[in-house]
Image (cartoon, coloured by chain):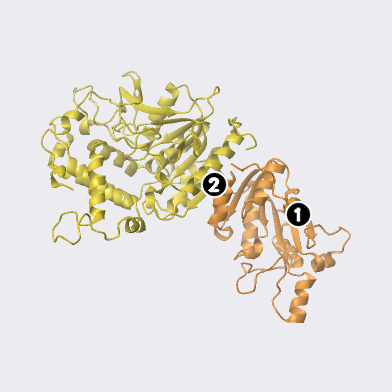
Chain colours: A yellow, B orange
Amino acid sequence: MNEAKWTSKPGQGAKGRARALPHAPGSQIVHFPQSEPLQLDCGGALAPFSLAYQTYGTLNEDKSNVVLICHALSGDQHVANTHPVTDKPGWWETMVGPGKAIDTDRFFVVCANHVGGCMGSTGPMSLNPETGKPYGLDFPVITIPDMVRAQARLLDHLGIRDLFCVAGGSMGGMQVLEWAASYKDRVFSAIPIATAARHTSQNIAFHEVGRQAIMADPDWRGGRYLDEETLPRKGLAVARMAAHITYLSDNALHRKFGRNLQDRDALTFGFDADFQVESYLRHQGYTFVDRFDANSYLYMTRAMDYFDLAADHDGVLAKAFEGTGTRFCCVSFTSDWLFPTEETRAIVQALNAVAANVSFVEIESDKGHDAFLLEEPELFDAVSGFLSAAARRRGLALPGAAGD
Amino acid sequence: MNTQSPLPQGTRVDLVLLSQMVEPGARVLDVGCGDGALLRLLAETRDVDARGIEISQAGVNQCVARGLSVVQGDADTDLVNYPDNAFDYAILSQTIQATRRPREVLEQLLRIGRRAIVSFPNFGHWRIRAQIMFRGRMPVTPNLYSAWYDTPNIHFCTIKDFAALCHELDAGVERSIALNAYGKPLGLKIPYVMQNLIGEQAIFLLSR
């Protein structure tokens, strides 16, 4: 890794960002005009606003085969197609696609970039109609319920009322829970994975480290870096590096890197990336900068911090699910210390308290929080078994599934 | 996707008998559902809304992959989370002898289910009595095959013991069936005392 890559020269890269927004290569976009604002939890409203989204598979005639996927903090709508910016596979191609657990031959899959995001939906990079300049920190603070409300607006726009399933991991899982709590009559089944009904103190603390890293970068310019044609590359990269550690586990890091040295035979007695793990983290950091907006990162982390589903229901999580008819499949991973199994167990207990139809699978894995994005056959088996049973209950015709 | 494949041959007769005690279309919780054999039977033959709790994670994952609604949990600690009358039937199939507090578990079953169905191995069977009496050793039978030091079964009872506990808890016994070694019910004409002697296992249908 070359130190030069870590230095943002004034203007470098920034011009490419200050493009006409919203910009969502390869995605469909729905624009909601000034007259159709999005009401926000902070008391304000966002108008106009746009959502960029991807769909996979075919919507059936009675629109009963819709699966909404909610992406995580640093994800986007490119679930199962090559990413237009990074050229990498979609972030959940292990799970979503023809013949996969979320089978696009059966289901119509929708995923939207969250409001506040940076892949085409309205966010802090977008132009503020009042000033004609990028919002920056003038963008209102967005919550998980706000994101879900925006997704509901997209579905309304698509003429879709009922979701056969809503699925997602991490921050996406928070949205799954919010969907199940706020739109009980629209959600037939829900798969919250590696998530929690509230963001813990420790997780808020990690997010604060990331935000402070961004804000400490002189190129952040109080959030106005797009106007000033700079980019807080170092700050965002450090934020990503710190966060990335929390997505893995000690075992996973050790298995992958141990104490191996990077392209050298001996320690250099300096602060270059001697160890492979350092080089890996730096790589994670600087590639993230190419596809993610620093202010968006502030807003996404804040949304997670503010999430506390029980608090919205008199402090009793079970009340959030009272009267639910949704079928739930909750999933956690043994080595996930960011969203540990206890968090999922709390959700399951709340669901049991209202006698909801719930399955709960804890999967043995040493891959940490990121396990939900990786090759985990038990995860696929659980999701596929759960969805097949739900589809049968829902009376969904399953093409080519004779005898299933 | 093997969720609706036919029941495996040799589905346990005791499970079939137990399932026949369940009204079609009911809401059922199977506590200690293992690999989900009873849940599948109930779902496929009685069209019930069937849920399960299982302590072993492998069992749970297997069940969920088969499309059954099962959570990982412990009968001793997790039944308190369920509301009163949440289910038409709360079932404890061949599990009560492995719980730490059978009495409390039974009370919870009767609270969350309008009815409870409990099946258990009968420790009063003559072969068990004979093994202790004549060999002076803890019994090992085809049904109870673990040695004393590695058995999960820590609270054995006889049919008579269980009936006494039901009485103590003021639970009504709507039906009770003693089964022979092959899982076939003993004839009704066999006197109660004999059932406790020659019944290998028993199924009780209880109500509050």
Measured from the top left, where is residue B147 in percent x and y? 65, 73
Vertical comparison of B16 with A28: above or below: below
In the image, farthest residue toward the right:
B189
Amino acid residing under circle 2: Ser
Numbered disc 2: secondary structure: strand
Numbered disc 1: secondary structure: helix
Which of A93 and B149 lies nearest the eye of the viewer? A93
Residue A151 placement: quadrant: top left
Which of A319 and B157 lies nearest the eye of the viewer? B157
Mark 2 belongs to which subunit? A
Amino acid residing under circle 1: Val
Measured from the top left, where is residue B200 in percent x and y? 77, 64
Mark 1 belongs to which subunit? B
Query: How would you rate the neighbour count of disc 2 (Cα within 10 Å): few for under 14, some for 14-19, many for 20 or more?
Result: many
Question: Which residue is label 2 attached to?
Answer: A359
Q: Is residue B102 visible?
A: yes
In the picture, measured across the screen, residue B62 lies left or right of residue B21, that is: left
Query: How would you rate the neighbour count of disc 1 (Cα within 10 Å): few for under 14, some for 14-19, many for 20 or more?
Result: some
- How far separated are the C-alphas under marks 2 and 1? 27 Å
- What count of labels does the image hold? 2
Measured from the top left, where is residue A299 in percent x and y? 28, 37
In the picture, measured across the screen, residue B94 lies left or right of residue A336, that is: right
In the picture, measured across the screen, residue A240 lies left or right of residue A150, that is: left
Q: Quadrant of the C terminus of chain A?
A: top right
Question: Which residue is label 1 attached to?
Answer: B13
Q: Is residue A347 visible?
A: no
Measured from the top left, where is residue B85 in percent x and y? 63, 47
Vertical comparison of A214 with B11: above or below: above
